[in-house]
């Protein structure tokens, strides 16, 4: 059974990933910042990735709670 614990890691290629703490396989999520974005963020892209993942996890929780209320067609912005 997969671990319920998740970790945010920086991969060797500079991407930031969310993965199960007991699994070295394919990450659940990968965020990649261009060199320009990393420069713009003055090297703080890891903190931005953490905030993005946190917001995504909160939204996923809301979606799971409201699953039966989702319309069939949704407009994505």
Image (tube, helix red, strand yellow):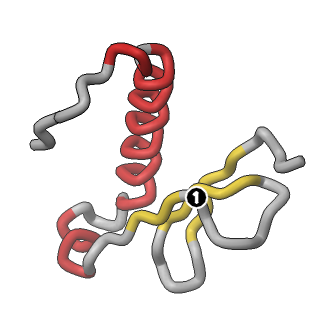
The residue located at (46%, 47%) in the rendering is 50
In the picture shown, does residue 76 fall above or below 12? above
Disc 1: which residue: 28
Give left or right: position of 33 versus 13.
left
Helix, strand or loop for disc 1:
loop
Q: Nearer the viewer, residue 36 or 16?
A: 16
Instruction: State the image coordinates of residue 4 (x, y, percent, origin top left).
Output: 78, 39
The residue located at (39%, 29%) in the rendering is 59
Q: Quadrant of residue 12?
A: bottom right
In the picture shown, does residue 24 fall above or below 35? above
Give left or right: position of 39 versus 77.
right
The residue located at (34%, 14%) in the rendering is 69
Instruction: State the image coordinates of residue 15 (x, y, percent, origin top left).
Output: 46, 73
- Please tell me how crowded label 1 is: few (under 14), some (14-19), or many (20+) other residues with Cα within 10 Å: few
Instruction: State the image coordinates of residue 46 (x, y, percent, origin top left).
Output: 44, 58
Q: How many marks?
A: 1
Give left or right: position of 50 versus 38.
right
Instruction: State the image coordinates of residue 63 (x, y, percent, origin top left).
Output: 41, 25
Most extreme residue toward the front, as rendered?
Answer: 72
Quarter of the image that includes the C terminus: top left
Give left or right: position of 77 versus 21.
left
Most extreme residue toward the bottom, as rendered?
Answer: 13
Most extreme residue toward the right, as rendered?
Answer: 1
In the picture shown, does residue 16 fall above or below 75? below
In the picture shown, does residue 12 fall above or below 64? below
């Amino acid at each position: 059974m997969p671990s319920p614990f998740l970790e945010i890691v920086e991969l060797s290629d500079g991407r930031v990933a969310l993965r199960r703490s007991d699994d070295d396989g394919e990450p659940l999520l990968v965020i990649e910042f261009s060199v320009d974005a990393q420069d713009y963020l003055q090297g703080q892209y890891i903190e931005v990735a953490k905030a993005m993942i946190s917001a995504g996890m909160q939204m996923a929780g809301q979606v799971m709670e409201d699953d039966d209320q989702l319309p069939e067609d949704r407009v994505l912005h």
